[in-house]
Amino acid sequence: MSRPLEGITVVSLEQAIAAPFCTRQLADLGARVIKIERPGPGDFARAYDGRVRGLSSHFVWTNRSKESLTLDVKAPAAAPVLDSLLAKTDVLIQNLAPGASTRLGLDYETLSKRFPRLIVCDISGYGGDGPYRDKKAYDLLVQSESGFVSVTGTPEEGVKAGASVADIAAGMYAYSNVLAALIERGQTGRGKHIDVSMLESMVEWMNFPMYYAFDGAEPPPRAGASHATIYPYGPFPTGDGKTVMLGLQNEREWAAFCKVVLHEPDLATHAAFATNSLRSANRAQLRARIVEAFGRLTAAQVVERLEEAKIANANVNTMADVWAHPQLAARKRWRTVDTPAGQIPALLPPGMTDARMDPVPAVGEHTDAILAEAGCTAEQIARLHADGVV
């Protein structure tokens, strides 16, 4: 079965999460992705943990369906190998340290003179220029710099997201920009430069709280797992020690919630709770009444009433619950992929039923084959190994 990006070759000087997440999605669509890694340890994300049968959880998530080429890109002997690869490459992606690609002659301005159809995507913390260009940027730091931590958490303390949202955001924008650049190249015949920063990606996601605080207004308060400005909207304990998440969006739902769920229809017009603004302002008082009512019920009974009232609700699932989620199973979203440690389950990408789901590579697994394809003889390959270039 053909896939949209079959015939497209991507070379990636990548590490950690943002660039690997971008290129894995390109591989999902059928692109050939050649991942260049440091000789020896490879991508440092391989050593983040050993939770997946000795492999890193981050790495197996973002690196399936790729070929691993170990290459010391700083070594003079690496230059002809890179030239040979780039001559047949459609997209070069890199998230090296700031300025590294320029020092290596792998920036778009340099490469476009020799490879005019090449698309070059740079992923960095703060972008290719500006006063923060050389500032180190890790996911937690960009979550902080973008204002995300200031509106996330409890009134007492801001917290980061439990997932690497700044890396994911940058990877997603790099992915979509690369797809757009491939379409544009089909029209113009020329490549282009893409400059994606983690900061700009996260600030785009922060536009709601930024506009909420427009022109010096107060920002949305930190409300834990509850909504900052809509109430009731968030987690509530039940009588059997579990938690139910629910969310109301309008006055019709509020009336139904009072009548069907709480069995207190008159509460809908209570002077302290008659509008969302009042409910949000008086949330401590309202929460006490909801917790008291839910305390007489099990989580299953609460959910049954919420469903009857057509009120949105969800379980507060653990990771084990998500692995066994009945909706994912019913929709047949799980596949298996090979890894150096054996087969593991992997989720199909959203919206796709025929994604490429090839193995997660070992460090340098494809080095010799790629070097031979690039025109190196057996003797040259042996010399590159002996000199520590690959």
Image: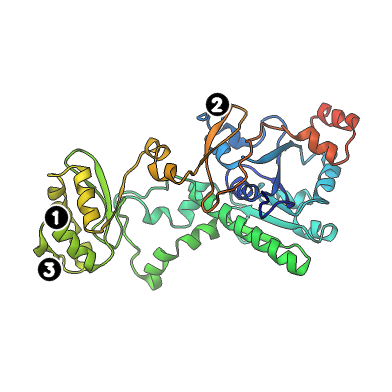
Rendering coords of residue 56 (x, y %):
55, 33
From this viewpoint, is residue 213 visible?
no
**Mark 1 — residue?**
262
Rendering coords of residue 226 (x, y %):
29, 54
Compute the Cα span from label 2 to label 3. 58 Å
114 on left or right of 280: right
Looking at this view, is 50 or 309 the one in front?
309
343 on left or right of 277: right
Looking at this view, is 320 or 117 the one in front?
320
Tell me the number on the disc at residue 94: none
Rendering coords of residue 133 (x, y %):
62, 56
Q: Helix or strand or loop: what does disc 3 sit on?
A: helix
Nearest to viewer (mark 1 / mark 3)? 1
Rendering coords of residue 130 (x, y %):
62, 61
Residue at 38% x, 70% y: name it: 216
Compute the Cα span from label 1 to label 2. 49 Å
Tell me the number on the disc at residue 54: 2
Looking at this view, is 64 or 305 the one in front?
305
Q: Amino acid at mark 3?
A: Thr
Callout 3 crowding tier (Cα within 10 Å): few <14, some 14–19, many ≥20: few
Instruction: Quadrant for residue 67, please give it.
Output: top right
Earlier-in-chain disc, 1 versus 3:
1
Callout 1 crowding tier (Cα within 10 Å): few <14, some 14–19, many ≥20: some
**Mark 3 — residue?**
269
Pointers 1 and 3 in contact (CB under 8 A)? Answer: no
Earlier-in-chain disc, 1 versus 2:
2
301 on left or right of 65: left
